[in-house]
Amino acid sequence: MRKFMVVLDDSRECLNAMRFAAMRAANTGGGVLILSVIPPDEFNHWIGVGEVMRQEARERIEAHFEVFAKWMRDKQGVDPELVIREGEPVDEILAQVKEDPEIGVLVLGAAADKKGPGPLVTSLVRQAGSLPLPLTIVPGDMSKEQLQAVT
């Protein structure tokens, strides 16, 4: 089964990327893999404190995932998979793509403000020509109706 991989983070545009991935998966018989990456700089503390922070980050990600997963299951009939990795976000995204041959499309949300589309989009667009799969960038200010029309 072809999976749409979408990155779960704290950005506002993440919501539209999640919606797009779920709608496309539902319309094409695919799946959704939700990847969340915990950056290494969150744990540069004493070992005990770092472990507690790592566990708290995982719990926060899992709670956030459950909100999206419930919507995907209830509204789109898609049961997403969660993968949590630790490291530099772009490196971990590329590693996940290499490790999972069922991932067919990478879906990212682009910020709608004047600062630019966001660091992940900027970094991955620079590498778009050498990526082993298509990259779909979903504008953060698209409405639900617009998303439905294009999926």
Image: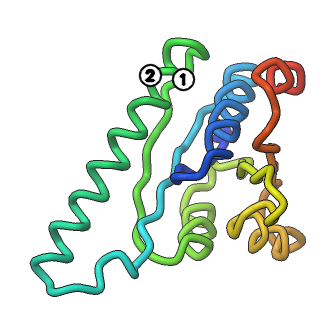
Q: Quadrant of the C terminus?
A: top right
Task: Give the residue displayed 75% in from the left and 20% down from the top.
Answer: 27
Q: What's the residue type where badge 2 is placed?
A: Lys
Per the rendering, the mark at residue 72 is 1
Which residue is tagged 2?
70
Helix, strand or loop at disc 1?
A: helix
Q: Nearer the viewer, residue 87 or 98?
A: 87
Helix, strand or loop at disc 2?
A: helix
Q: Quadrant of the N terminus?
A: top right
Q: What's the residue type where badge 1 is placed?
A: Met
Looking at the image, residue 45 lies above or below residue 74: below
Task: Give the residue displayed 82% in from the left and 44% down from the top.
Answer: 139
Looking at the image, residue 136 lies above or below residue 49: above
Q: Nearer the viewer, residue 93 or 104?
A: 93
Seen from this angle, which residue lies furthest front?
A: 114
How many numbered discs, if any?
2
Q: Nearer the viewer, residue 29 or 76?
A: 76
Q: CB under 8 Å between callouts 1 and 2?
A: yes
Badge 1, how many Cα within 10 Å: few under 14, some, many 20+? many
Looking at the image, residue 102 lies above or below residue 129: above
Check the image and tell me how it is coloured. Answer: rainbow
Image coords of residue 116 (percent x, y): 81, 64
Q: Locate residue 117: give its quadrant.
A: bottom right
Q: Nearer the viewer, residue 100 or 26?
A: 26
Image coords of residue 125 (percent x, y): 83, 68
Task: Give the residue displayed 25% in from the left and 66% down from the top.
Answer: 54
Task: Give the residue displayed 49% in from the left and 31% down from the top.
Answer: 68
Image coords of residue 120 (percent x, y): 68, 66
